[in-house]
Image (cartoon, helix red, strand yellow):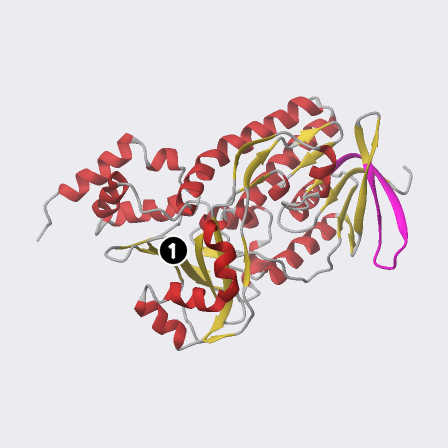
Amino acid sequence: MAGDQYDVIVVGARCAGAPTAMLLARGGYRTLLVDKATFPSDTVSTHLIHPPGVAALHRWGLLDRLTATGCPSIHTYTFDFGDLTLAGSPAFDGARVAYGPRRTVLDKLLVDAASEAGAEVSEGFSVDNVLREDGRVVGIHGRDRGGRTAAKRARVVVGADGRHSLVARTVGPEQYHAKAPLLAGYYAYWTGLPMEGRFETYVRPNRGFAAWPTNDDLTLVIAAWPHPEFEANRRDIEGNYLKTLALAPTFAERVDAGHRESRFYGSAVHNYFRKPYGPGWVLVGDAGYDRDFITAQGIQDAFRDAELCATGLNDALSGVRSFEAAMDDYQSARDGQALPMYEFTCQLATLEPPPPELESLLGAMRGNQDAMDGFARLNAGVMSPVEFFSDENVSRIVAGAREPAVN
């Protein structure tokens, strides 16, 4: 085989691309993984991994590497609505806890795992063009960190290069279920703000904020407001950030006792699905599907899609099924699993007060540990919104609230 001919080239080596390359390389495919970044390096990301994402790391044999970094585990999710606080466990059979590792830690771990699996990793490689012949993607052209240009060819090119994906821009996939940005959020890292294994969320009128622990005794604190306020509020990010936290005075006091260790990082995100495949190309992670960060689903979505994509590509490359059939199943599985949480996330991201029926349901959960655990699992992506808001489950929660207390 020619030196620059691969089975698969994966463009983008973070939470979607590196696992995709790792899984394909483990399957025996000649895989090239490229990224313009070098690792370890940071990226704008709130980097919470809910238990389904933790379960994926366990399946891949990488969870012990993550825990060895000293990243604290998160066993309790709390939701403070002002006059009501719910606290529950997001645990399920696959994983008991969540983690919030820095991307400097997580991405390096994933890239190393891809390399160990046999993928060729080219860091500091900037892709400037996607090669096409007769309407089919056949490779990439770019340059390494020394400025040397090169063309690399493959049977399939996977775009895992984020929401601003060059691969997606080149192939122009169909976009659907699209929504404009709904909120803007800014986060910073703090010391002196112990979380004791909790992921804390605060909901106030037209505002939301949250905090959780990460590596190096740091705590990530994020504050968000509706997107129409984005331009006005960015003139004083710190002031608006602190005013938002002050809506929960007890939490604000805890923050005041700590110390901010970083600048503010922020963004607003478009919401969309893109058709994730076509002749010679596939999209995975944010390149193919993105949603607001309010439910912090991004990393575990990337892990899920990497597994679905790698499974489909294995079938296609091995000749078990046609490329179109295998990738159509990938798209159907991705959309079927993602769409309910996507709609739930977009609803939350409006930061509008909950409708009366949801407010009543939240009140009915108070003191009902099973219901609060279910609400935590809903927000962690363990339980689908379809299941949580089913008539059967809602009736069970309401009935539990009506039961007399046992003395």
Q: Amino acid at mark 1?
A: Arg
Question: What residue is drawn where x is 42% and y is 68%?
Answer: 242
Q: Is residue 150 magenta?
A: yes
Residue 144 position in % (x across, y down): 84, 54
**Magenta span:** 139-157
Mark 1 neighbour density, 10 Å: few (under 14) some (14–19) many (20 or more):
many
Q: Residue 359 lies in what quarter of the image?
A: top left
Q: Which quadrant, please, contains the N terminus?
A: top right
Q: Which residue is mark 1?
A: 207
Q: How many marks?
A: 1
Q: Is residue 203 magenta?
A: no
Q: Mainly helix, strand or loop, the magenta region?
A: strand
Q: Is residue 315 visible?
A: yes
Compared across the picture, whether 295 is left or right of 202 comes to: right
Q: Residue 251 lies in what quarter of the image?
A: bottom left
Residue 114 position in % (x across, y down): 70, 50
Nearer-the-camera pick, 284 or 67: 284
Q: Is residue 320 visible?
A: no
Compared across the picture, whether 102 is left or right of 367 comes to: right
Residue 208 higher or lower than 389, as above or below:
below
Residue 351 position in % (x across, y down): 38, 49
Nearer-the-camera pick, 46 or 69: 46
Compared across the picture, whether 197 is left or right of 291 comes to: left
Residue 172 position in % (x across, y down): 69, 33
